[in-house]
């Protein structure tokens, strides 16, 4: 995996990151740090990448378990050390999983597997941060299940 991160110029603290997969992301610093607050901070990107990694796993595991998952949102809250290096010291993941007839034990298992085995980002951050998670399940009754046959 490769990325390129380039400072966008001398008038601030913006950086343009280009990924090996061909995507670009802008990052910026806070005004008090010389930035212009135009984009997420680099450490916010670390946190959101971790959320994306874990949510990806949860959806994939639930689908493989033949669960009718229709939505997955994860809200992360984190604490950082007061002194340099200001590593994450606590990260809490709250998953909101939407679907039809989702089995709570399978949702909990998917989250645990992500955190213990599959999500490289959260496992890596777990070396410095205390990790915790919670979840809620929302029943989606708006559309017929993809597992149910509909008559025409």
Image (spheres, rainbow, N blue to C red):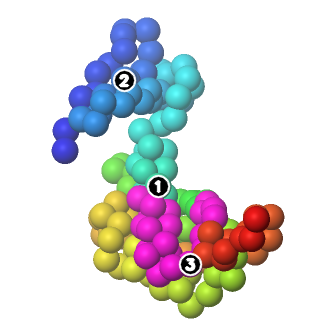
In the image shown, does 137 or 152 lie closer to the viewer? 152
- Find the residue positioned furthest to the left: 1
Of pointers 2 and 1, the one earlier in the residue sequence? 2
Residue 7 drawn in magenta: no
The residue positioned 74% from the left and 71% from the top of the image is: 151
The residue singled out by tag 2 in the image is: 16
Residue at 80% over, 64% down: 142
Query: Dot 3, how many residues are within 10 Å of its Cα: few (below 14), some (14-19), or many (20+)?
Result: many
Dot 1 corresponds to which residue? 52
* Region rendered in magenta: 53-73
**Residue 97 image position (x, y, % from top left):** 64, 70
Disc on the earlier residue, 2 or 3: 2
Q: Mark 1 falls on what kind of element? A: helix
Tell me if 101 is positioned left or right of 119 in this view. right
Mark 2: secondary structure: strand
Rounded to the nearest angstrom, the CA distance separating label 2 from label 1 is 20 Å
Q: Which element type, helix, strand or loop, lies under badge 3?
A: loop
Inter-mark Cα distance, 2 to 3? 39 Å
Q: Find residue 113 and report its image quarter.
A: bottom left
């Amino acid at each position: 995996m490769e990325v390129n991160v380039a400072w966008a110029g001398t008038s601030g603290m913006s950086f343009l990151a280009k990924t090996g997969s061909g995507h670009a992301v802008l990052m910026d610093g806070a005004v008090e740090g010389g930035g212009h607050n135009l984009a997420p901070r680099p450490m916010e990107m670390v946190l959101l990448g971790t959320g994306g990694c874990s949510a990806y796993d949860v959806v994939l595991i639930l689908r493989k378990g033949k669960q009718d998952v229709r939505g997955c949102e994860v809200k992360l809250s984190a604490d950082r050390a007061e002194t340099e290096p200001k590593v994450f010291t606590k990260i809490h993941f709250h998953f909101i999983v939407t679907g039809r007839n989702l089995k709570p034990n399978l949702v909990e298992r998917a989250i645990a597997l992500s955190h213990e085995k599959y999500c490289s980002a959260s496992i890596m951050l777990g070396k410095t941060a205390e990790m915790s998670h919670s979840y809620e399940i929302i029943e989606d009754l708006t559309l017929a299940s993809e597992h149910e046959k509909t008559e025409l």
